[in-house]
Amino acid sequence: MKKKKRFEWGYLLLLPGLGYIGFFVVMSAGIMIAQSFGMYNAITGETAFTLEGWQGVFSKSFVDALGFTLRTSVLSALISIAVTYPLALLLQKSKARKWLLPLIKIPYFVPGLVGSFLIVNLIDYHGLLNEVLMLLHIISEPLRLRNDANGIAVIAIHVWKNVPFMMIIMFSAIEGIRQDVKDCARNLGANSLQVLWHITIPLTVSSALVSVILTFIRTFNDYAISSTAGPMHPMSLANLMKTTAYSYNDWITAGCIGVLMTIVTVIFMVLYTVLGKYLQNGGGK
Amino acid sequence: MKRRNLAALAMALVMLCTLLSGCGGKNGSAGKPDAAGKTDSPASAAPAEAKDLAGLMDVSWEEIYAQAKAEGSVTFFVWHDEACYTEIAKAFEAAYPGVAFDLVVSDASAAVDKMVAESSQAAGSFDVTVVNSPQTLLEANVFYGPIVDKLENAANLDQALCHAQEGYIHNGYLAPLYRNQGGLLYNPRNVSNPPETWEELEQWIDENPQKFGVCHPLQGGSGGVFLLAALDNLCGGLEKYDGDIEADESKMENWETLWQWLRDRMDKITITSSNNDSLSRLNQGELDLVAAWDDGTYTAISNGELFKDAAFYVPEFGMPGGGDTIGIPKNAKHPAAALLLANYLTSDEAQALINDFQHAYPGRVDIAVEDTVIPVEDFENRTNWTPYCYKRAYSLGFVSEVLEKAS
């Protein structure tokens, strides 16, 4: 006869943690979803179910903002990894890494808004970049790089901010490769490029993918950088959400935008988890 | 086993209690004296017969002062010119001994969020607040009113601002603190003959591509001011909109002229991200002519953020002016002190101080104005705002009809 399993009171120890998640994450997300259907209006306090927000959310402004946010997020993540990978490989072999590594990590600890102002100073009309280009007679008039429609300034700031973040992940991954595996390859006649291609990259590609996804999520939800250096149109989704709520006083559509942003983030979080598990299990090998 | 479960249960309860106590608001301490011995809630702060804002409307200023003294302090929110309001605080405390002036200087939109969030609570954080954009606060029913008629200098206040701010009708809920004026600001080293008529402005923009800057109307009032001036000059004047509560579609039929005018010049006009961004770009030499506010210009020049010979004027084609106001939240902790401060802020002394520091035209029309960036005669070119329903329409139209179609 099967013995009835007794309730473990020890599970109650999870309450503070689960309570925190339940209260601050699940409930606030629930309220945002409710707001997208017209409930819990933050300004008037009115509650009336409506699909008005969802019917109008996919406006040209939203589609433009989504396109801009996706473009800047994907490009920022890809450029960041393209910079980080070789940098991490070089640093791993460098004798100066003890002091270079902490230096490279500095931007990670600088708040996004501060970093944004720092970079804006570089790319502004009379910023360092324009002054140098003028001095070298490469340009005759300063370039207007700030608030440019293609979001080049936004991407540059995201790369500046995310390379150190990726470096933390990638450097650990490269450091984690056992030296005897590389020595073994060399004993079998592999040159440096072959070691990189057949040993280092396959063993660190999982970390690279994870760091790309995490960076994408960070940049996709950014507000501070795109609001200071981003174009007037299209805005980033976070900026559009704020403008919709505060300037248009349309909290219902703002709720819809918030829900859509959360859905995209959750999709990428799931992708990150699935990918992590897949790679943890040896990538299907 | 039982003992282990009991211990786990006890620990869980302790941790749960810790979490719940952490989530608790300030209400638990309401009414308790603070370090200075003052109390937190209006009920316990004032004497037993203390009146609320409605009750205070019918009593004398002596009685209001007596109750304000019992309340002990007044909290005033503003987002700019800290030096000015620090001086006003000293003068207020000297004029009304026993009523401490607590000045809060912070971000304007954060304060709006706070007031809206607190609007259903018994006691809010602010007693008197400066208002630059009234719509959100009035729609959230934050303020007590009307208060203007209670003020001693009500008759001398700018009557248009007493009735509406930025086209939003408030009917005396907000009292004018100072007036400001939209205009054009230019670099006299690069612009020798600034445009006065609309045709001259068109010509100037065409001849100087990307040197004219306008703030995005949703991110700074100077952008909206320029759009109104364009609407006035291109779509047959602003008078026809007067008095409308809801936007009349038939009056907006010819707005396509405005949108087309802007679309045709989007590659020649620089859209900036804020009022200050326009000034900053003018200062850097990126722009030579921008839409701006008079008080913002004076502050920027005084702070060294803008070159001293930057010239501000109200062109002949007309630009709207407005002003900022003060309001008393319904849930002000210190209602008598709030009313006393509102009255003081519209007094000769406070209005003169505002002019001394901010160099803006005061909310009172009978106060002599000294040292502003615009001469009085430029006020002849001042136009009014359209009702708020149209402000929303042209701000949103700028995005949908100009920015989206031009991109």
Image: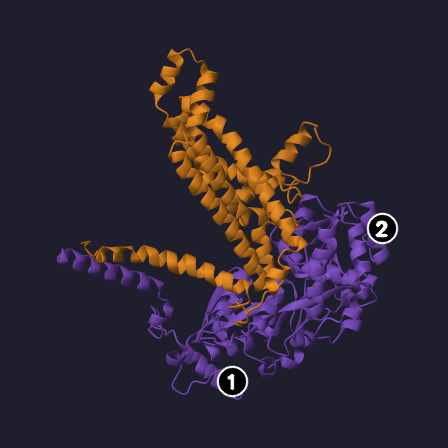
Closer-to-camera residue (B206/B68): B206
Q: Secondary structure at mark 1?
A: helix
Q: Give the residue displayed 13% in from the left and 58% down from the top.
A: B3
First of labels 2, 1 by sequence position? 1
Closer-to-camera residue (B383/A152): A152
- Which quadrant would residue B293 be assigned to in this image? bottom right
Chain bearing mark 1: B
Residue tagged 1 = B54
The disc placed on residue B165 is none
* Amino acid found under the numbered disc labelled 1: Ala
Q: Position of residue B92 (x, y in %)?
A: 50, 72
Q: Tell me what hue chain A is rendered in.
A: orange
B30, above or below A52, in the image:
below
A136, above or below B290, in the image:
above
**How dense is the environment of label 2, judged by Cα within 10 Å: few (below 14), some, or many (20 and up)?**
few
Residue B56 can be seen in this image: yes
The disc placed on residue B203 is 2
Residue B305 can be seen in this image: no
Image position of A198 (left or right of A61): left
Closer-to-camera residue (B235/A172): A172
Q: Position of residue B255 (x, y in %)?
A: 79, 62
**How dense is the environment of label 1, judged by Cα within 10 Å: few (below 14), some, or many (20 and up)?**
some
User: By what rule are the colours in the image chosen?
Assistant: by chain
Chain bearing mark 2: B
Q: Give the residue displayed 55% in from the left and 44% down from the top.
A: A117
